[in-house]
Image: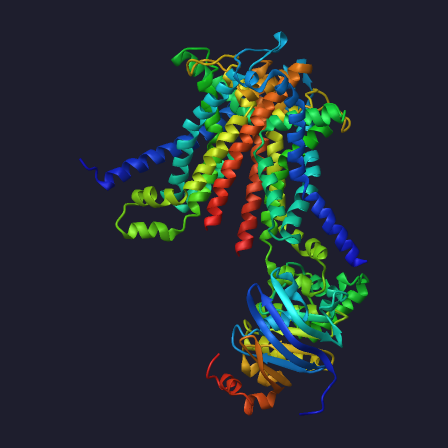
Amino acid sequence: MTTRKPIKISVRELRVFQGKEEGLRGVNLAIPANQILGIIGPAGAGKTTFLRALNRLNDLSPDTHVEGETLLDGQDIYHPSFDVVALRKRVGMLFALPVALPMSIFENVVYGPRLSGVRNRKRLDEIVERSLKAAFLWDEVKDRLPMSGLRLSGGQQQRLCLARVLAMEELEVILLDEPCSGLDPISTAKIEEALTILKAKYTIILVTNNTKQAARVADDTAFFLNGEMVEYGPTGKIFTVPDDKRTNDYVTGKFG
Amino acid sequence: MKLNGEKIAKYALMTVAFSALASLLLIAVFIFKEGLPFMLKVGVKDFLLASDWDPQAGKYGIYPMIIASLYVTFGAMLIGAPLGVAGAIFLNEFVPKQVMRVVKPTIELLAGIPSVVFGFLGVMVLAPFIRTHMGGPGLSVLAAAVILGIMVLPTVISISSDAIGAVPNSYREGALALGATRWQSVYMVTIKAARSGIIASIILAMGRALGETMAVIMVAGNTVKIPHSVTDPVRTLTANIALEMANATGMAREALFATGIVLFVVIMILNGIALSVIKTKVRKK
Amino acid sequence: MKISPKITQAVAVTLLGAATLLTVAVLVFIIIFVLGKGLPWVDWEFLFSAPKEMGRAGGIFPTLVGTVLLPLMAIAIALPLGVGTAVYLTEYTRETRFTRILRFGTDCLAGIPSILFGLFGFIFFVITLKMGWCLLSGGLTLAIMVLPTIIRTSEEAIRSVPNSYREVSFSLGATRWETVLKVVLPNALPGIVTGVMLGIGRSIGETAAVIFTAGSALRMPMSAFDSVRTMSVHFYILAREGISNEKAYATAAVLVISVLLVNLAAYSMMHRFIARRSR
């Protein structure tokens, strides 16, 4: 193992119940800051549930119930005194399908900052430029910012969504839920390139059903199966000499 | 601070959400408050079953009006229900989708024709026709029933047609695969599956017919009398309220509110039945 | 003797088709008849001049104004209540016994006949609150009458807003109320407008609930506490009291056209809304 960076998110015995189903069965994980954690595993392994637990989007589903401890910088994000709105500004999320809101490209990007009370037009302009550049979309849209975000291609929309997350000035962690599953190879490459640059500033957790993607960009990789975390370690080790047979079977394509 | 605003919004919305229910209760309370003491004073039985209505003479029997409302409403259903259900079946099952897509909205659009206009046509066209061909004054049970029957058509067609449209295609295909003709599949499968929606549409239409006022005033003739033939003029419960409201005071006005109570209760029962018919259907799914 | 299924089918379809044709024919006849009899008497002067001799001569301008003002007032009152209710039911609560009661109340209110709204509006607004026959009494009464329509259409419109929009908004740190204001309502707007149009259409055509609450004064209303006469009420009085058949037909024609236009706008709005959603 390389020199460990400080722990950003620490999860202990995290259990998520969805109705009667147990979506996560006691996950333990310490996620270091400023690197990319890849989460791999077959469909239904609990990857998305895990991600949604980290910014409490699970709260929105009425019969979901969470147990265990989830610490962000040492603070329990499920503690009643923890401000969930502030949490979501620090922990941004990119969804599997690009969801551009039906408003202009500009308004999509400044959605978060406006909620935080940024009104100054010059500052909003700066935020838009910085975020779109970081998401590798600036050159393609800089001349048509007032255009509806819905008119962009799927790959562009997903980068717009990334820019929208990056626009939040409080952002510390980026959660990505199979962000490239519907995208063309060029858009995928652009997003992956953006992520490798962004990890200098943010902690990134990338759920992917594409093991090659995890191998390409993740520093560490965790393998999930049936709501449990089977194995966690440096990406190189997980993909070459995993400890667990199930991990080996999955990364070599025997199932999944 | 933000969360405070959030709380305010939540409680404000919760309060607002009571508006419909509160209005309903307010309506019930005020109509009962005005009418119930009167009804008890006169005696519920005498009020409902006595045949003399003459407020000036202190006679408050609404029996003829109840009978009139029943006749007119059922007459309207005899016309509106078969035509409406037939229309809904035909449009859903035997006509290309494009035709359906034009005709159904057109019919629903016509639901917006004000009731006074229907009433006026009843007076100008239908009543003279009845007078010449069937005798009597023209303004009659028959005229009211026909006009109301036409007025409820959009309700019946729209709701039954939604119910028929909601029947899964696999049902029809199953029947057709067994060698049924189109009509047999409709008759044995589709109508059965859409039954509760069709019934609900008829009950709701009944409520509309019973509650309709202005059109009925114009075409029913408004004589307080138990009709002996369909060409006799009658006065319905609703017409009674509307006709005498303008001038009534004191006891006479209370009597009108008591009439309102009767109407309110019957309509609530009809709506309750229609709603529960629809609900049980939904639950079964 | 057994009749062959083919013949049964032919008979059934013929009967059903005839019934449908009759229905459509009757409804279309009504429109054509009213317009045919009425439109020849309608001109600018009829629309924009004051009536004379109780409406026997002259135009319908004050009733036209009443027909615009009264529904607008009703909507101004019912819109915030109806949309607020819909937002609460869809965004702020799950299906519980409580929401079922609220929904039941809405459904019942929708079934109440207009004459009972008239009775209630009269005894409550006109008499008990001492507001008299006026624009405001009528507006409040009609507001209650169209409230269920607005609640239902708004609820449907709000439900059709994709959930992913809400998730994105929440994930960007929006509160529930911010999400409602910035994402939910703007996207539900066409559906809400449809409900508003249907409510206006119903208010324009309403007579029984209006005549007992807004009165029937045949002059220009100068404030919310003035009595107004809408076209429907005017038409009813012209026809019922036999004042003038010509003027009655002409008023009916204007009335029918107004209602059809408003409803047409509502339906085309709704269809465009549905088309956009399914894209």
Tell me if I can see residue A148 in this picture.
no
Residue closer to the observer: B283 or B216: B283
Q: Examine the rendered structure and indicate whether residue B45 appears above or below residue C206.
A: above
Q: Position of residue B18 (x, y in %)?
A: 68, 42
Q: Position of residue B1 (x, y in %)?
A: 81, 58
Residue closer to the observer: C234 or A77: A77
- Give the quadrant of residue A101: bottom right
Asked whether, in this view, residue B111 is left or right of residue A160, the answer is left
Quarter containing the N terminus of chain C: top left
Q: Examine the rendered structure and indicate whether residue A142 appears above or below residue B210.
A: below
- Here the colouring is rainbow
Residue, x 44% and y 28% (percent of image)?
B77
Asked whether, in this view, residue A35 is left or right of residue C243, the answer is right
Residue, x 58% and y 22% (percent of image)?
C250
Residue, x 67% and y 37% (percent of image)?
B22
Residue closer to the observer: B250 or A26: A26
Q: Residue furthest left?
A: C1
Asked whether, in this view, residue C21 is left or right of residue B27, the answer is left
Q: Position of residue B143 (x, y in %)?
A: 46, 19
Q: How many marks?
A: 0
